[in-house]
Image: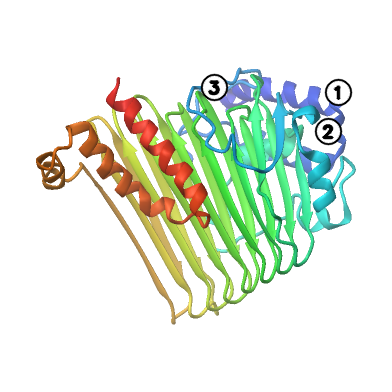
Amino acid sequence: MMDTVNTMAPWREAFDAFAANDEAAAMGSKSRAEAFARFEAHGLPTKRHEYWKYTPVRGLEPSGAVATREGGDPFADVEAYRLVFVDGRIDMSRSDHAALSAAVEVAGPEGAPWMEGVFGTLQNRDIPGAMFQVERPFADLNMAMFTDGLAVRIPAGTALSKPIHLRYEGSVAAHLRLEMLIEAGASVTVLESGAGALTTGAEIVVEDGASLDHLRAQTEVGERQFTALYATVGADASLKSFTLCADAALIRNETVVVMAGDNGSGHVAAGVMGMDDTLVDNTVYVSHEAEHCESRQVIKSVLDGNAKSVFQGKIFVKQGAQKTDGYQISQAVLLSERAEFNAKPELEIYADDVICSHGSTTGALDEEAKFYLRSRGCTEAEAEALLVAAFIDEAILEIADEGLQGRMRETTSAWMNARAGR
């Protein structure tokens, strides 16, 4: 207990200073205090915490600097409503805030009535099943100390013509947040990139007949990044979320999706590429609470050196959620004998008319396939690059937009070229 207290003391000091001095602290002050109390009680995760046993967190300080690597931003030249956050604050001179505000409703610091159904409610929603007991300390930290972000309502029937791109830059270990209501029949694409956030949190409601495509590029994170996304998906609605991770010291992505209306669809996918001492953890929970819903969890990892990838995924099917179609696959290619992949797939089903499955495989590249490509004139590096591209493509195909699929493939190819040139 004493070690936990000593570890958390700098965080308590940082939170007290934030609450007393930061203009952002007034928004949701009660929710912030409650969230920090949960974070403080939990402490930094260790191997003793069940859902962090593969991903302990050591030496994290509130004043720690953010390190950026030269991974490139695959969304840099995408035509989008771009919102740039530097050191935890929006840079209005580089952001399309006015243009976005003209197209949809963007809430200011005082919030908006619709946020009462989103802000802080999804993150703390009682989720049935074993995962209900799991604490999420970095989601709580984000709720407690976020300094800026985006709160936006997409009006019913609105198809936003361009994606919203949230760009995180700077050297401060910032905490940034997204609150989003996508009303009935609306559609939007959200992009995230950049290393300038220690934590990000998102609470998203996708109402009946609406759709959200979400892409996150973690290709520039040099040190650590923790993300949490909570979404509810209504009837005949769709959520697709894809994350591409490469070479960070530690990334933890938590995604919780509640299928709340009949005939909804929720897909969560990730491509992980790691060299040297990378550690990436994708933890996903999908709760089926309505009939005729479909969910997919597709995680592909390519690991070299001492890299590690973790996948913890669960499909929960509530009693009465008949005709559920839930699928989960996690696969890893190990390019080094020292690389490591840990998978913990789970199914918890209380309905009797469902199709649910999970699978996990780990291994090296297919030597016969590599030999075939070499016999057709490919170098060994070229053969490996082609096989890796084909392997990760199953996850990339979860992206709805073919142009954005291409950008992810380009990033994968650049990573393989960098590996070959080491």
Residue plotted at (28% across, 33% down): 339
Q: Earlier in the sequence, mark 2 or mark 3?
A: 2
Report which residue position mark 3 lands on. Answer: 68
Name the colour scheme. rainbow
Distance, label 1 to label 3, CA atoms, is 28 Å
Residue plotted at (32% across, 41% down): 341
Is the C-beta separation of discs 1 and 2 under 8 Å? yes
Q: Earlier in the sequence, mark 1 or mark 3?
A: 1
Structural crowding at the residue carrying mark 1, measured as other residues with C-alpha within 10 Å and reported as few (<14), some (14–19) or many (≥20): few
- 268 with respect to 107 (left or right): left
Does any portion of residue 328 appear in the rendered image? yes
Quadrant containing the N terminus is top right
Determine whether the residue tagged by mark 2 lies in a helix, strand or loop. helix
Does any portion of residue 51 appear in the rendered image? no
Q: Nearer the viewer, residue 309 or 108?
A: 108
Number of the front mark, 1 or 3: 3
Residue plotted at (15% across, 47% down): 369
Quadrant containing the C terminus is top left
The three-letter code of the residue at mark 3 reads: Thr
Report which residue position mark 1 lands on. Answer: 21
Determine whether the residue tagged by mark 1 lies in a helix, strand or loop. helix
- 122 with respect to 376 (left or right): right
Residue plotted at (51% across, 56% down): 285
Report which residue position mark 2 lands on. Answer: 25
